[in-house]
Structure formats: structure tokens, C-alpha cells
Amino acid sequence: MPILELSNVHKGFGPPNNRSEVLTDINLAIEENEFVAIVGFSGSGKSTLVNLLAGLETPDTGSVVFEDAPITGPHPDRGIVFQNYSLLPWLTVTGNVELAVKQVFPQMAKPERKQHVAKYIEMVNLTPASWKRPKELSGGMRQRVSVARTLAMQPKLLLLDEPLGALDALTRAQLQDEILNIWDREKKTVVLITNDVDEAVLMADRIIPLTPGPKATLGQPFRVDLQRPRDRTTLNFNPDFKRIRNRVTNYLMDLNEEAKRLSPVKDLPLPAITPVHNVA
Amino acid sequence: MKKLKHLLLKALDVAALSVFEPVVRLCYGEDPKAQLNKIGKFIVIPILAFIAFLGIWHVAASNIETKFGSMPTPPVVWAQAKVMVNQVFENMEAKQAFYVEQEQLAQGHETKSAQFAAAAELPKNTAQKEAFLAEAKAQGQLAENARNASYAGTPTIVYRVVHSLKTVFLGFLIATLIALPIGILCGLSPMFMAAASPLIQIFKPVSPVAWVPIAMILVGALYTGTSMEPAMISSAIVVAMCSLWPTLVNTALGVASIDKDHMNVAKVLRLGWWTRLFKIVIPSSLPLIFAGLRISLGVGWMVLIAAELLVQNPGLGQFVWDRFQDNSSAAFGQIFVAVFIIGIIGFLLDRSMIIMQRSVSFDAPVAA
């Protein structure tokens, strides 16, 4: 029984005469405690898809069902970590997490709430910076706050919308490990949106490519049966890892080729121009 | 020591006085050559420019003859400033003397009252007794009146400054109370904005002078209280009518241009309308709101002088008008003193608003 199910979902934007169909015919079923990565090129509609899952957008046709009930709007059960952190700049780290906790667990007494907030800040290793404001933190630290805020809401489904896209490679690797650790402990259903195939193979149980837009749809899924915990240092020499990575990458490259072939403009007629130098 | 330096620099930064930063750095012996260079450029040159201004003023003023005598030169204005300060002290002394005198008067009446009360015990005749008692009571009343009398000398410049500040803050308060809620509603609802926009566009450019008669007539008709002078209320209303627009427009802009990410957070957390307003919308628009308040207070102070002059509210505006009516060269000099006082107070108000604006602005670093 899947916890999250999308059937025949279509989503487009704009008026009827100038409509851009972003997603067409999306079918997806995610099991409980599964870690699914959705991989796609930029502009293929990944964020639209995650907004549908979060309930920030509603599908034009088709249905998005979470725990047997159609999604009608955002809910704390489906926590989302935004690509651009979306922290409130006037609140401290603690303040940002606390705002979410206060909203989701209004019955919590103050000492209990403080403890709860502190626990999740500790989980992302930010206790020493808990009094700082987002402006004073690095990108990686900001994204950690965002992760802590979402985890503190104790969602059943964790939506990660390219959470590490804006980070440098070293910070990215560190945060990947931290997220995997937390996932291992907290056991949640995770949907990770990414454009990084290595990241997807390292983290996910299943990788689903999103074809290039417009009219993007989900492609052939790849199962990742690598044993956990996965160690990034030895993974590079693991033949299974290499095989899956190459298959996914090739699949995406082929999709891209196809998309280019199908695109209406084949050759732009360029005028024959020769540069003129030393014009008086 | 290093910490103190850091604190000083930060305080200067927050107070928007970073021109004095090189002085602090020089005191700590940090790269003296560069600091002296900066002091020369940004402190000494401005001082020289001010001196040059005084020089030009002096030369120009010496050559202008008016019906009030010659135009006051800087030394004349300075002398008048001293005269005004002396008046303040003289007034204080006179006031003190007045109250001492009143107290003596009151004590005299009290003694008489006590004498009459004692005398009332002696006669057997009831009519005479009652007459004595009535006299005792009357003397007691006189003593009380003497104690309650308040000094009514001509208002000094200090009194006028305080009165003007009270009036401008009353007007600013009225403006803020009107502008903030309407601005927030305009920012939240495009429909409300569309409805309010024509009114804003029409009333915003109206000169303060046009509001003066309206305010005076309305206050005359509607205000029956005694706790404030009608002139003060009229002036405050004129200030409010002219200074509410920058706050209103800035608040609307701040609320309307709230970051989409922040609204997404509000949606995901499913914040209620009020929580969203107080936890997301208002904090995120505070920097723009305070920018608006700062402009409003500046406009309000400028408008106040004109309003006081016309309404005859006993503040700085009325002072300028009184001096003009005085027709003397000394009074002409005092008008110049008033101009400087008005300018300096306006500057200080602006500075204090900058400090407030910085302390709520989450984009700029705030002193710990």
C-alpha cells in the first residue's frame, strides 16, 4: 500500500491561448519509508512536481493522494526543505525552528518545546550557532537550519527540493551524509529532487528520471540495491555503483538528445557576417 | 581595549556617524597616515566648508539693508542666541520668585484663616460665630488659590521647543495610527489598494496650508475637552494629514513585496491570518515601514512650523511669526536663531529614526 500516489497528473500554467504544459501524465507510487530520488534537467518541472506533493499547487487533472486522502493544501505531515532555505531573516536559528514547532505542536508546554527545538538543532550540529541569524551563517549552515525546521515538525513525508543545489561540493557531501544518518535514525519516507545523479545513487532506494520539459513526465525507474550504509569513499570503486550511475546518466543523456531532436528549431539561420577592424 | 574599540566603531556605525570612525581608529594608533587622510577629507573639509558658508553669509548680509535694519550677520545671530538663552534663565528665576511669593501669600492667608477659626470659639453669639467661620473658610480658599496659581510669563524658547516637539509627536502618532493599518491592508489586498489609491493620489499633494482652516474649524466644532489647547490639536492634525502618506505608501509597498519564499513558509506551516500578519508580514516589512516613518517624521517637522505659524500654536512656528511682527533688527536675528534650532532638531529627529530603522533592519548587521 503506497503512502503517496500520483495518478495521471497534469499541470500547466498560463492562459489557454498561451499555455505551457509543464507536467503531463505523471504516475508515481511511493511506499512507506522509501527514499526516492527524482532526477531531471533544470527547467524540467521538478519544482512544480514537489509543489504538487507539498500541496502548494493543485493538479489540473489527475489526483495526488497521501495516506488515502487527496492532497488539498500544505500539511505539516508533508515537510518540505526548499532549495533557497526560506529562513526568516529576522529570527535566530532557534526562532526559525521554534516558529514551526509552535505551529505544529501548539499543545506543547514551553520547557518541552525548548527541549524539542534544541534536539533538532543538535541533530544538524548547529547548537553552537543557535542564537545567530541566517545572515551570519554560511549556505550549508542555513540549509541545516531549514532541515532542522522541517524535521522538528516530525513529518511523515520529507520533501527535499534540490536542498544541496546551491552548496559547494565539500559541504554538499557532508550534508548528504548527515541527511542519510538522520533518515536512517528517524525512518521517514523521503522524496529527493535533484539534478545530481551521483547524489541520487548515493542516497536513494529508487531513482526516477523526469524527462526534459515542456510536457515532462516520469521515465523508467531505476532501483538502487546498494547496501546501506553507503560509504562514499569506497563507493567510487564499487562496480554496482558505477553501473547504476552510468545507466541513469546515459538514460538522461539519451532523453536530452531526443528532446533536442524533437525541438522545433533545428538550425537557426545565421547571417554571414565578417568582423570589420580598424574602422576610422 | 580592543573590545571597547570594536564597540565604539559599531556604535558609530549604528548611529550613522561613521565619519568619526577614523578618529577612533587614530586614538588606537591604527595606520595613522590613512586615518589622518580620512579625517582631513571627511571632517576637516566639511568644517572648512561651514566656515566658508559663514564668511559668505557675513559678507552678503552686511550689504543688505531691510526695513528691520541690516540683515543679521553671524555674530549678530550669535549675540541674539545668547540673549535668548539669558531670557530662559531670567524666566526661570522670575518663575521661582513668583512661586516663592505665592507661597508667602498663601501662608499669610492661612495664618489669618487660623486666627478667624480661633476667634470663632470666643463669642456666644451664633451669628457672629458663623461670620468668623465664613471668613476663616474664605481665607483658606484664598491660600489654596495662591498655591494653585501658575506662572504666566511669555513662553521661552525652551518652552516653545518642548511644545513643538509635543505637537509634532502627537501629529506623528495620529499619522502612524492611520497609516499603518491602512498601509498593511493596501499591501495585503490589491482590491483595497485599488479602492484607496485615488484618495491617496488626491490628498497626498495637498499643501499643509490648505488643511489649516479645515482643521481649525473641525477642532472648534468637535473638540470640547480642556486637557489640550485646540491650537495644538489643529496643528497636530495638519501634521498628521501631511505626514501620513510616506508611511502609508511604504508600508503598502513593504507588505506587497514580501518575499514569496516567506509566504511559502507561512503556507507550509499553515499559519493563521493573525499569526501570518504578526510573524511574517509585519517583521518582513519593518525595514520599509521604518523608512516610511522616518520620512513622515521629517515631513511632519517641516509642516509643523507652517501650521503653528498659522494656527498660533505657541511653538517655534508662532515664535517666528511673533518675531516678524516685532519689526526690530534684534527680532530679525532671533528668526535666524529659530531657523538653526528648527534645522538642528529636524536633524536629530532624523538621526534617531535612522538608529531605530537600523535596529529593526535584518539586512544590515545590528550592534550586539
Image (cartoon, rainbow, N blue to C red):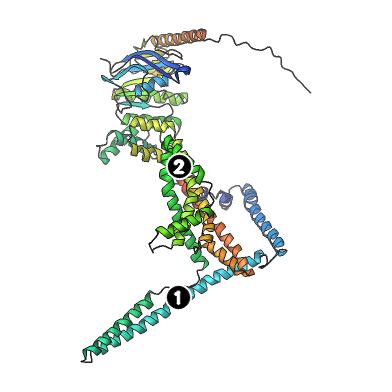
In the depicted structure, whether residue A239 falls above or below residue B15: above
Question: Which residue is at 50% across, 71% downward?
Answer: B154
Query: Can the viewer see residue B18 in this picture?
Result: yes
Which numbered disc covers residue B79? none
Q: Earlier in the sequence, mark 1 or mark 2?
A: 1
Q: Nearer the viewer, residue B266 or A2?
A: B266
Q: Position of residue B133 (x, y in %)?
A: 26, 85
In the rendered image, which residue does mark 2 sit on?
B251
In the depicted structure, whether residue A175 falls above or below residue A273: below
Q: Nearer the viewer, residue A246 or A70?
A: A70
Quarter of the figure that contains the C terminus of chain A:
top right
Q: Position of residue B215 (x, y in %)?
A: 47, 56
Farthest-out residue, right: A280
Quarter of the figure that contains the N terminus of chain A:
top left
Q: Is residue A19 left or right of residue A119?
A: right
Kind of residue at badge 2: Thr
The chain containing the residue under callout 2 comes to: B
The picture quadrant where one finds residue A225 is top left
In the rendered image, which residue does mark 1 sit on?
B96
The picture quadrant where one finds residue B194 is top left
